[in-house]
């Protein structure tokens, strides 16, 4: 290879960097001014670095027949910036690929594809914007609570959205309790550093994260807080403690002033609706006061199972979850009320039970009584896998089912829930931070006649937290139209 050719590689790279840099202010302005959330094949590009944006474009080669360059998407953003758009989710990657195929005038193309929100931008007064937000309170500040905090803060920049107003915890007992909680939010051994700045307001007992004032309330119980004294009204409380899981326990939150609804980040018991967003979120009504977001495993497998049921039918099957250890287990051998969970989590694979297989039927009734399930806790701190061993009503091939699930991940209404990877080299840490409920590993798919085995990865913390926020958005009436609408031929 000549010296000129070698230099050309670097020149091409720096040109792509320059183009990606030009995209960042457009992405930010569309988000903060117009409430337009942009992505590239489902991967958000808001508040992302130049390298993140280039990598999002590079991902497209895994799922399409051709490369996608930032040179293809920059003109899309530039044109969108001039359209006075209203609120919406716009996948500029899919638009760019489609425009390359169709050609013609970019202006006419965008009018066809995102016309319904063109010209809908409206300048809002500060008072109107305040009225359009929905107060959110996190009850508990553990693994899920802190990840929900990160997502809520990340999404706060666009306004007209959910606004995290407070977190409620028990008194920690340490004089530097606020600093300790701020430190846990600031630094995470699995998910890395917080993307922004965090300061502590001791006088007002609050954390200030990227400009968001978050009141820290110490309370001994869910029915003993008057949120209105902090200016919090009609709030949705997200209970991520897991202590109360039935209507009687969770109903205590509704006794506190300023609370209108409750979301549980664990499987609900009794008559509480267990919602898997993308599957049965149409069950949510204005009358619902308490809802559950089911479990991380239920969220991971239900969308994939729904896709398989719709296309091939399922006679019966078994779900085995290979799950990272959780805070419920012991670091070293010690007493635990649960079977086997007393043994050291970082040193052992621990066979335990899971209710996910039965819980699927709560969101997908056609699978009632058809699935069995079990779980193995393994010595990794995050990212789990579900193995779906299914007997189908129709015969299937590896190539056929993979192509179908790839299409579901890219172009169906389940694209936020199902992701798809087709690499022989991926391992669990490659999926840390994934906002999809589950990721189908195409290289691991096994099919023989009517027998199908699927391997589904999932970030049991971040992916689940994203699903929780999707449900809470719907509860709050904060919804966005998604573009492009029409499926590809």
Image: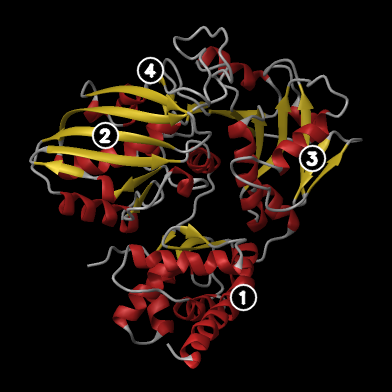
The residue labelled by disc 4 is 353
Q: CA distance from mark 3 to mark 4?
A: 38 Å
- The tag earlier along the polypeptide, 1 or 3, is 1
Secondary structure beneath dot 3 equals strand
Mark 3 residue crowding within 10 angstroms, few (<14) / some (14–19) / many (20+) = many
The residue labelled by disc 2 is 388
- Residue 43's place in the image compared with 385, above or below, is below
Secondary structure beneath dot 4 equals loop
**Quarter containing the C terminus:** bottom left
The residue labelled by disc 1 is 21
Residue 157 screen position, x and y as percent: 67, 56
Circle on res. 207: 3
Residue beneath the point at 58% across and 29% down: 261
Residue 145 screen position, x and y as percent: 62, 33
Q: CA distance from mark 4 to mark 2?
A: 16 Å
Q: Nearer the viewer, mark 3 or mark 4?
A: 4
- The tag earlier along the polypeptide, 3 or 4, is 3
Mark 2 residue crowding within 10 angstroms, few (<14) / some (14–19) / many (20+) = many
- The tag earlier along the polypeptide, 3 or 2, is 3
């Amino acid at each position: 290879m000549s010296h000129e050719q070698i230099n050309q590689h670097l020149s091409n790279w720096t040109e792509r960097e320059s183009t990606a840099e030009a995209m960042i202010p457009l992405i930010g302005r569309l988000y903060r001014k117009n409430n337009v959330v942009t992505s590239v094949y489902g991967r958000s590009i808001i508040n992302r670095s130049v390298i993140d944006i280039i990598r999002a474009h590079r991902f497209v080669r895994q799922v399409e027949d051709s490369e996608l360059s930032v040179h293809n998407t920059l003109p899309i953003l530039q044109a969108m910036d001039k359209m006075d758009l209203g609120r919406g989710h716009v996948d500029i990657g899919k638009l760019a690929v489609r425009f390359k195929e169709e050609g013609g005038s970019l202006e006419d193309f965008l009018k066809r594809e995102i016309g319904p929100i063109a010209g809908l931008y409206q300048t809002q007064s500060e008072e109107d914007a305040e009225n359009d937000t929905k107060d959110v309170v996190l009850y508990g500040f553990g693994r899920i609570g802190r990840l929900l905090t990160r997502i809520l803060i990340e999404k706060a920049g666009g306004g007209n959205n959910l606004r995290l107003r407070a977190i409620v915890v028990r008194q920690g007992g340490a004089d530097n309790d606020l600093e300790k909680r701020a430190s846990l939010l600031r630094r995470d051994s699995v998910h890395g550093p917080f993307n922004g700045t965090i300061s502590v307001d001791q006088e007002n007992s609050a954390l200030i994260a990227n400009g968001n004032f978050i009141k820290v309330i110490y309370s001994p119980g869910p029915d003993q807080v008057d949120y209105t004294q902090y200016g919090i009204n009609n709030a949705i409380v997200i209970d991520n403690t897991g202590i109360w899981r039935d209507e009687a326990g969770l109903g205590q939150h509704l006794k506190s002033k300023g609370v209108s609804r409750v979301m549980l980040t664990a499987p609900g018991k009794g008559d509480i609706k267990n919602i898997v967003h993308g599957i049965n979120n149409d069950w949510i009504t204005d009358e619902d006061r308490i809802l559950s977001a089911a479990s991380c495993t239920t969220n991971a497998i239900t969308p994939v199972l729904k896709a398989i049921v719709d296309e091939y039918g399922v006679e019966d099957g078994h779900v085995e979850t290979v799950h990272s250890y959780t805070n419920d287990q012991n670091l070293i051998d010690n007493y635990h009320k649960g079977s086997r969970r007393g043994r050291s989590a970082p040193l052992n694979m621990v066979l335990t039970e899971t209710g996910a297989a039965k819980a699927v039927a709560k969101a997908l009734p056609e699978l009632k009584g058809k699935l069995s399930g079990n779980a193995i806790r393994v010595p990794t701190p995050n990212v789990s896998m579900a193995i779906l061993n299914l007997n189908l009503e129709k015969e299937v091939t590896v190539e056929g089912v993979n192509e179908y699930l790839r299409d579901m991940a890219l172009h169906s209404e389940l694209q936020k829930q199902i992701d798809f990877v087709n690499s022989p080299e991926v391992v669990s840490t490659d999926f840390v931070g994934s906002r999809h409920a589950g990721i189908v590993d195409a290289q691991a798919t096994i099919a023989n006649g009517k027998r199908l085995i699927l391997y589904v990865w999932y970030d049991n913390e971040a992916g689940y937290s994203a699903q929780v926020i999707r449900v809470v958005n719907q509860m709050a009436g904060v919804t966005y139209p998604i573009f492009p609408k029409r499926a590809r031929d």
